[in-house]
């Protein structure tokens, strides 16, 4: 099975990199936008995974014991984003209007951009981006290394340290994620601002991380790598969390829409004007249905949450919806009046999927997929998701 | 349950064995009374899935439509009011009350259907006639077998209950005539 996945990831990486190399010469502007979209997609899920593991520690979640390592897999690949971000630094000029503001933006926008110059300039942006990723990467390394050290010999004091690290880290990383979303997404639009964007970005990423957890645990359970005992109960719990965060995402998305729509201020409302026209309006509609309407109704069903295949299918659908979400956030800045899917989008997605998949396989080579020495692991087997 | 037999147990595990023994004889109409919920007992009873979620969902649906349509009608037609130049049927502004309406009627649907299905509130039930039953809230587990079960036979059921390890078996309610005569 491992071999099959390695081949899949290598093919994805090969095709993706080939596409990206061709794309950077054919259409560099599109290349950067496609790459940023795919990169934000994986970064948001990675951040969600780190926060999920930390939440598990901070809540001392016993049921999570047998799933913690599965959740740690996407979190562990986070340091690779320090490498994967590099192409974006070469394309800042193409991506962000504040680098070289064009006079077409109008006096108002130019004034706003000038006002934000001390924050939005290339050196500071690059340093901030590296700090944001670096902090998440440090958290990921501490958590995964600590968890693997617990495998060798269980030590309550070490777990207590992980608990404390998580409680404090969640607060810091909550701010980091918000600032990162302001830098990476909000500044794509020269004048737009929305203070809730960070929470919205988190909600999407966290539901992505939970979806990935549902899929990975279904795949690994099928392969016999995870304990069968209580697996359905734990899966139901993941399904319930998924339902909660689908609702949470819709809540944040709607709160942002309502406040901006009802205030109707020129600096903010352009964001939704672009996304409600004849072209992007359809994407907004599909996004609301795909990321909330459909999964919400499906996840209400207890039977679907208890079936491994059904839950994995809903989770896969949500991962797709999350890509539409990121696409909807980024792409209207490139083509405001039309939806223009491009093969580079797929290439960027494949390249990052392959790279991160391979690094996950590499990091967890010869590692146990369950933390068997942990008392929480044994409590997790007896966990009852009632009713 | 209007009438039947009430068996008293010290331990939920014995209760589970009694349920299985009765089911093997084809007697299925029974109910367990316990100081706290025991998963094994609920599983052994093989209760049908609860219908409360359906009523909760229908209540939510009704609440959403009622709240939305009320605003749509009052704001858009009955007393059309232009607020800040926004359209009269301003969907985003209607959503928060719609959400509240959904939650309110979904909660009512869940609560009222739960009360209805459990026939609550009820101050007295035939099982309360049995003196031992007062210990159900502290340390005893009870199994009530319904006399209306087509396979119910008082002597046979009593034998099974006693053989399964019941501390006591008592009749409650008005047993059907053919049973009472025995």
Image (tube, coloured by chain):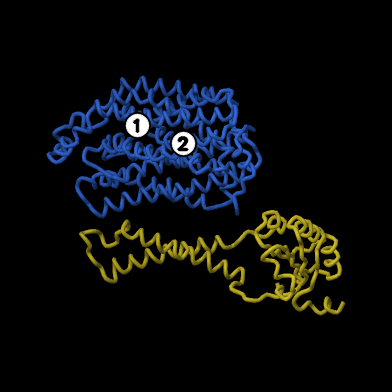
Q: Which quadrant holds the N terminus of chain A?
A: top right
Residue in front for this viewpoint, A227 or B132: B132
Say which element carries label 2: helix
Q: Tell me which label, 1 or 2, sits earlier in the chain.
A: 2
| Chain A, chosen colour in render | blue
| Chain B, chosen colour in render | yellow
Subunit that carries the residue with mark 1: A
Q: CA distance from mark 1 to mark 2?
A: 15 Å
> Is residue A296 in view from this perspective?
yes
Q: Disc 1 or disc 2, which is closer to the eye?
A: 1
- Against A113, is A251 above or below? below
Q: Which residue is mark 2?
A: A49
> Is residue A331 in view from this perspective?
no
Residue B32, x across and y down, in percent: 71, 63
Outermost front residue: A157
* Residue at the spot 43% in from the left edge and 36% down from the top edge: A45
Q: Which residue is mark 1?
A: A132
Residue in front for this viewpoint, A61 or A50: A61
- Give the left or right position of residue B41, taking residue A347 as reference: right
- Give the left or right position of residue B100, taking residue B79 as reference: right
Say which element carries label 1: helix
Residue in front for this viewpoint, A121 or A88: A121
- Give the left or right position of residue A292, taking residue A385 as reference: left
């Amino acid at each position: 099975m491992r071999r099959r996945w390695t081949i899949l990831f290598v093919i994805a990486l090969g095709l993706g990199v080939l596409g990206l190399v061709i794309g950077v010469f054919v259409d560099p502007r599109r290349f950067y936008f496609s790459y940023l979209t795919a990169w934000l997609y994986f970064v948001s899920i990675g951040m969600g995974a780190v926060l999920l593991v930390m939440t598990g520690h901070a809540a001392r979640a016993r049921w999570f014991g047998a799933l913690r390592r599965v959740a740690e897999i996407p979190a562990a690949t986070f340091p690779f984003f320090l490498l994967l971000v590099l192409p974006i630094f070469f394309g800042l000029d193409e991506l962000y209007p504040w680098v070289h503001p064009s006079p077409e933006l109008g006096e108002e926008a130019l004034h706003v951009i000038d006002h934000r110059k001390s924050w939005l300039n290339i050196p500071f942006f690059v340093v901030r981006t590296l700090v944001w990723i670096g902090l998440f990467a440090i958290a990921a390394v501490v958590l995964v290394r600590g968890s693997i050290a617990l495998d060798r010999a269980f030590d309550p004091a070490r777990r207590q340290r992980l608990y404390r690290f998580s409680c404090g880290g969640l607060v810091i990383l909550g701010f980091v994620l918000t600032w990162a979303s302001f830098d990476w997404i909000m500044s794509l639009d020269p004048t737009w601002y929305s203070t809730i964007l960070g929470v919205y970005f988190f909600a999407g990423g966290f539901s992505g991380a939970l979806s990935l957890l549902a899929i990975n645990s279904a795949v690994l359970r099928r392969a016999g790598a995870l304990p069968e005992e209580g697996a359905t109960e734990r899966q139901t719990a993941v399904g319930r969390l998924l339902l909660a965060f689908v609702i949470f995402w819709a809540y944040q998305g709607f709160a942002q829409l309502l406040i901006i729509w009802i205030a109707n201020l020129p600096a903010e409302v352009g964001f939704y004007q672009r996304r409600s026209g004849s072209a992007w309006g359809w994407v907004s509609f599909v996004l609301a249905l795909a990321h909330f309407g459909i999964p919400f109704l499906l996840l209400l069903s207890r039977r679907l949450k208890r079936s491994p295949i059904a839950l994995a299918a809903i989770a896969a659908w949500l991962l797709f919806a999350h890509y539409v979400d990121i696409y909807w956030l980024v792409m209207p800045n490139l083509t405001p009046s039309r939806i223009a899917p491009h093969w580079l989008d797929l290439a960027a997605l494949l390249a990052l999927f392959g790279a991160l998949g391979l690094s996950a396989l590499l990091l967890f080579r010869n590692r146990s997929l369950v933390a068997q020495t942990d008392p929480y692991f044994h409590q997790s087997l007896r966990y009852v998701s009632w009713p | 349950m209007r009438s039947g037999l009430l068996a008293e147990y010290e331990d939920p595990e014995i209760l589970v064995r009694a349920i299985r023994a009765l089911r093997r004889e084809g007697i299925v109409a029974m109910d367990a009374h316990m100081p706290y919920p025991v998963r094994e007992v609920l599983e052994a009873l093989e209760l049908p899935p609860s219908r409360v979620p359906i009523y909760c969902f229908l209540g939510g649906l009704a609440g959403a439509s009622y709240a939305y349509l009320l605003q749509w009608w009052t704001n858009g037609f009955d007393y059309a009011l232009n607020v800040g130049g926004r359209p009269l049927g301003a969907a985003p502004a209607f959503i928060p009350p719609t959400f509240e309406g959904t939650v309110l009627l979904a909660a009512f649907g869940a609560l009222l259907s739960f009360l209805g299905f459990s026939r609550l509130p009820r101050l007295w039930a035939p099982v309360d006639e049995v003196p031992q039953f007062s210990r159900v809230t502290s340390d005893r587990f009870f199994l009530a077998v319904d006399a209306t079960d087509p396979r119910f036979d008082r002597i046979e059921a009593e034998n099974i209950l006693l053989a399964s390890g019941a501390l006591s078996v008592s009749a409650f309610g008005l047993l059907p005539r053919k049973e009472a005569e025995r």
